[in-house]
């Protein structure tokens, strides 16, 4: 029994090559994201994205990032703002697990990207109000993170992880 290489070898780079992503490739990533499980099959995840070759759209998303995330993302092949629908569609009750389900979808996207030799770098450092204003995010939806997507050719940058006995507890925590 072994952990999948796709999972083991993933890391978030701080630089990207010039190689572009195609429309077909990015749509495939979102298709993988959309296969995730979600509470009541609500599929609360939404993705607003821009390819670097579409300069105006790319800049709009770039302008939603905090300064600390701006240097190294300028060369990403694509930028994404992740968004959740905050309430369930069927009754408009709060969906307490919407962000959980968004995370599952991004997890799928991440594994699919790895299988295609594509790297992600996710970011909490966004300016949500900029996203709401610049990207037409409607009421009832919340921008959550950004994702830089692209190709990387440097050496691997796999980081340390907590051992399993610090994150999983048999019976009681
Ligand atoms: C939800 C989320 C938010 C993050 N926010 C940022 C960020 O704003 N800026 C940044 O440089 N990295 C950010 N990261 C990247 C993490 O620092 C990185 O995933 C973590 O250090 C583990 O490294 P690895 O992804 O290379 O394994 C974020 C990652 C996640 C999942």
Image (tube, rainbow, N blue to C red):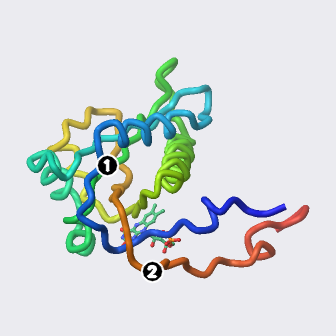
In the rendered image, the vertical position of residue 159 relative to residue 55, given as above or below: below
Few, some or many C-alpha atoms within 10 Å of disc 1 (few <14, some 14-19, many ≥20)? many
Task: List x then y, in percent, for residue 102.
Answer: 49, 44
Quadrant (top left, top right, bottom left, bottom right) of the C terminus: bottom right
From the image, state whether disc 2 or disc 1 is nearer to you.
2
Cα–Cα span, label 2 and label 1? 27 Å
Q: Residue 76 sits in which quadrant? A: bottom left
- Which residue appears at 51% of the width and 31% of the height? 43
Task: List x then y, in percent, for residue 23.
Answer: 29, 38
- Which residue appears at 27% of the width and 59% of the height? 19
Question: Which mark is drawn over residue 1?
Answer: none
* SS at badge 2: loop
Residue underneath mark 1: 81
* SS at badge 1: strand
In the rendered image, the vertical position of residue 165 relative to residue 104, given as above or below: below
Left or right? Give the position of 134 relative to 32: left
Q: Residue 72 sits in which quadrant? A: bottom left
In the rendered image, the vertical position of residue 153 relative to residue 2, given as above or below: below
Which residue of the protein is positioned furthest toward the right in this rendering?
Answer: 171
**Mark 1 Cβ inside 8 Å of ligand 1:** no
Task: List x then y, in percent, for residue 12.
Answer: 44, 69
The image quadrant where one finds ligand 1 is bottom left
In the rendered image, the vertical position of residue 69 relative to residue 50, given as above or below: below
Residue underneath mark 2: 155
């Amino acid at each position: 029994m072994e952990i999948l290489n796709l999972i083991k070898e993933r890391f978030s780079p701080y630089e990207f090559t010039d190689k572009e992503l195609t429309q077909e490739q990015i749509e495939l990533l979102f298709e993988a994201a959309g296969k995730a499980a979600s509470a009541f099959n609500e599929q609360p995840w939404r993705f607003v994205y821009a390819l670097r070759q579409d300069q105006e759209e790319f800049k709009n998303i770039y302008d939603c990032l905090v300064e600390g995330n701006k240097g190294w993302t300028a060369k990403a092949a694509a930028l994404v703002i992740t968004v959740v629908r905050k309430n369930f569609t069927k009754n408009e009750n709060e969906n307490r697990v919407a962000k959980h389900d968004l995370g599952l979808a991004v997890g799928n996207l991440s594994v699919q990207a790895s299988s295609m030799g594509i790297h992600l770098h996710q970011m909490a450092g966004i300016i949500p109000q900029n996203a709401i204003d610049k990207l037409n995010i409607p009421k009832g939806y919340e921008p959550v993170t950004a994702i830089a997507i692209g190709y990387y050719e440097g050496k691997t940058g796999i980081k340390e992880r907590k051992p399993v006995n610090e994150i999983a507890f048999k019976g009681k925590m």
